[in-house]
Image (tube, coloured by chain):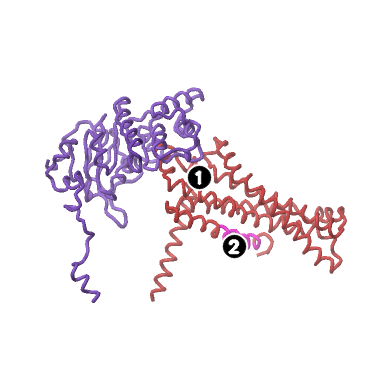
Amino acid sequence: MAVQDPTRQFTNPMVEVSDLHFAFPQRSIYQGLNVLIPRGKITVILGPSGCGKSTLLSFVGGRLRPQKGRVVFDGDEVPTRRGDALFTMRRKMGMLFQSSALLTDLSVFENVAFPLREQTDLPEELIRILVLMKLELVGLRGARDLMPAELSGGMGRRVALARAIVLDPEMIMYDEPFVGLDPISMGVIVKLIRELNDALGLTSIVVTHDVHEACGIADYIYLLGDGVVSGHGTTEQMLNSEQPGVRQFMQGLPDGPVRYHYPADDYLEDLGRAI
Amino acid sequence: MLWVRHLGQLGLRFVSRLGMSLVFLIHALYGAVRCLPRFSLVVQQLFSIGVLTMLIILVSGLFVGMVLGLQGYNQLVNFSAESSLGLVVALFLVRELGPVLSALLFAGRAGSALTAEIGLMKATEQLSAMEMMAVDPMKRVIGPRFVAGLIAVPLLAAMMSAVGVLGGYIIGHGQFGVDPGVYWTSMQNGVDFVDDILNGVIKSVVFGFVVTWVALFEGYDAIPTSEGVSRATTRTVVTSSLAVLGGDFILTALMFGGL
């Protein structure tokens, strides 16, 4: 499938990133990135390590500002928002970090209750009910008194997920949710992402480099590479793509448009130099 | 000429870090003001950085006082001035050793812990997660710790001075038989509230401010890796110790030196 202008594909998207340019002092990240996140769907952002997949979530969350281009969340320009306006916007989004990012000095229960205590004045009984409901949803109601250090990686991520949805956001962003999980935990997370998306009517963005899991849950896939979208489409379209870059990534071929060799001088000449 | 360039780089880096720490300070102070309505957060931090530092402060204070008693008596007795032992011990502690030593111990015991805690919170994305949960870390994490540091250090300094005076008494009276009445009276007559005690309190407030600022900034600014956090912790102890000792000289010169 040829790369078309993605702006024509979805009407009224949840997130709209257009012509995004950004560079860290040492490294350019985006050169004109265009991504649309449709409402109520699971959109997977694929790409090799270090291509700026996770950074994209920082732009959507307003933690970084683009040097050029627009980032729109639910009709609001993200980069223009600061301070309290930014915080108001963030209440509509939840985020699951790769490291789970649980507050280590609080128990599982208190971690999930944290956003409620900080953002609302709900009475204690109501907080308890809400927290237990969310913990039940991720299957960890019985683990409420454990401390984060006592949890396995998969359980930690489920607690973080319960915390991310406790304020009933409209969108949830998953940063590498499958990294470092055993097959069972992985299956649980995949099931949860799908179920939460459908049951709560969420919009989900999943950033990952795990093609297999991505194909299992994605409604739509974007593949990033070299600072732009190098391919996008439904799972089927992506798997059957003839585009060399997409084919290399989706099938995990060692050589292709992404070179096997790190750029270097001519091999023989390099060897000859030592003599 | 390479060293000139290195020197310039070092200078630039120093100035830029100073600027960053000032910006951080403004945010931290604003966060500290906003966290005051939820004083329970401050109380929690007072416990972990104040109460838990008390033991080391009390024990050190006792030893420092006893050393002052020993050294002071042995010198004073040469001039038959051992009746001034109470005054000497008290002035040393209230003016200098109480504020300075308690700030140094605070930097080692609580400052390093603050840096490591915040650095690790950053490394494990806890601070980012808070931001994404629409919770301002400056208000929730930095603010309460700042206020707690400001409250804890002067109190710790006062405790150190008090215990030190007792230590001096134990040695002076118990070991050398200085008359208790003389020990306490010389103190009552010689220690001035404004000149000595208030100046000491001002010192320890300044030190508490500086040490907490350095510790929080280093943690917040740490490179989020194990190595980065370990370096930041070291820098906290080194920088805040130097700042306390250097600052003590300046403050002493201003308060007592007649400069």
The chain painted purple is: A
Residue B249, located in which quarter of the rendered image?
Answer: bottom right
Does the CB distance between marks 2 and 1 fall below 8 Å? Answer: no
Q: Which residues are magenta?
A: B240-253
Q: Colour of chain B?
A: red
Residue at image point 16% right, 52% down: A256
Which residue is more in the foreground, B222 or B14?
B222
For residue B31, above or below residue A168: below
Which residue is more in the foreground, B97 or A143?
A143
Element type where label 2 sits in the image? helix
Residue neighbourhood size for the residue with mark 2, other residues' Cα within 10 Å, grouped as few (<14), some (14–19), many (≥20)? few
Instruction: Read off the chain for label 1.
Output: B
Q: Look at mark 1 in the image and give the residue it sits on.
A: B142
Residue at image point 22% right, 38% down: A221
Q: Look at mark 2 in the image and give the residue it sits on.
A: B246
Say whether residue B249 is magenta: yes
Outermost residue toward the front?
Answer: A183
Q: Amino acid at mark 1?
A: Ile
Q: Amino acid at mark 2?
A: Gly
- For the question of whether residue B195 can be seen, the reply is no
- For the question of whether residue B240 can be seen, the reply is yes
Q: Is residue A85 left or right of residue B92?
A: left
Which residue is more in the foreground, A198 or A120?
A198
Residue B9, located in which quarter of the rendered image?
Answer: bottom left
For residue B180, above or below residue B9: above
- x and y percentages locating residue A102 in the rendered image: 44, 39
Instruction: Read off the chain for label 2.
Output: B
Element type where label 1 sits in the image? helix
